[in-house]
Image (tube, rainbow, N blue to C red):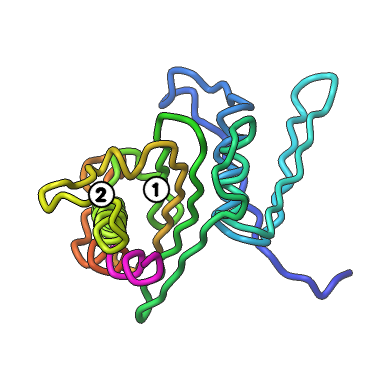
């Protein structure tokens, strides 16, 4: 007997619908790890009982998306020690960004809307990139790094070596395409852009 309550959901792929009903351990682990990062403090225990040897992984990250950035930067050399963290809430809309520069040449921006990986980006990513470029250029002009009036840093310049995670949560999410790969809510551009601009400046 217990006073605890909860919901258990059991899912089994129907072989009449799916051509392949094999569950890929690494794909599931990656997805569950993302959920643990995106929902700070949640504890997910992932167990694979299929083989003779049980595989079990406990996923809990109290640092949330800051821990996600640190995880993505393993093996890289960060340019600044602390991960930059920015968040804001307006009504029932929430946005958080974690970012850190490394000595790498490539950029790695990962974005989510309501915990869904928006692999094609969208309005939240656009707002982030616009604000970041604006902050860099204004700083460069103010402190004399960009002396010529026509000299401007491009977006690519500002994102070189950057690892960033953008996560937004909103009630009426509008996605483009069937795979929900791109966020279309126009208000997210302004919310993310203003927040990043003000707090990063």
Q: Could you tell me which quadrant the N terminus lies in?
A: bottom right
Q: What stretch is highlighted in magenta?
A: 193-201
Residue 27 falls in which quadrant of the image?
top right
Q: Determine if residue 124 is in view.
A: no
Question: Residue 18's spot in the image, x, y percent?
Answer: 43, 24
Q: Could you tell me which quadrant the C terminus lies in?
A: bottom left
Q: Tell me whether circle 2 and circle 1 mark residues in contact (CB < 8 Å).
A: yes
N-term mark: 2 or 1: 1
Q: Determine if residue 40 is in view.
A: yes
- Which residue has dot 1 on it? 111
Q: Does the magenta stretch include residue 199?
A: yes
User: Can you say whether 31 is above or below 50 in the image?
Assistant: below
How many marks the image carries: the answer is 2
- SS label for mark 2: loop
Residue in view at x 61 percent, y 43 percent: 33
Question: Which of the two residues, 61 or 7, is positioned nearer the viewer here?
Answer: 61
């Amino acid at each position: 007997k217990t006073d605890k309550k909860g919901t258990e959901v059991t899912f089994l792929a129907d072989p009449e619908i799916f051509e392949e009903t094999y569950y890929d351990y690494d794909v599931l682990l990656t997805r569950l790890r993302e959920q643990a990062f995106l929902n700070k403090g949640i504890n997910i225990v992932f167990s694979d009982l299929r083989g003779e040897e049980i595989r079990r992984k406990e996923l809990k990250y109290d640092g949330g998306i800051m821990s996600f950035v640190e995880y993505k930067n393993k093996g890289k050399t960060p340019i600044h020690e602390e991960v930059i963290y920015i968040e804001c809430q307006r009504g029932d809309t929430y946005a958080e960004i974690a970012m850190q520069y490394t000595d790498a040449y490539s950029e790695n921006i990962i974005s989510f809307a309501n915990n869904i990986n928006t692999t094609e980006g969208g309005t939240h990513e656009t707002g982030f990139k616009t604000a970041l470029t604006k902050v860099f250029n204004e700083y460069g002009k103010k402190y004399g790094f960009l002396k010529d009036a026509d000299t401007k840093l491009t977006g690519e310049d500002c994102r070189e070596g950057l690892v960033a995670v953008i996560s937004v949560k909103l009630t009426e999410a509008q996605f483009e395409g069937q795979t929900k790969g791109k966020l279309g809510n126009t208000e997210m551009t302004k919310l993310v852009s203003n927040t990043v601009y003000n707090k990063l400046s």
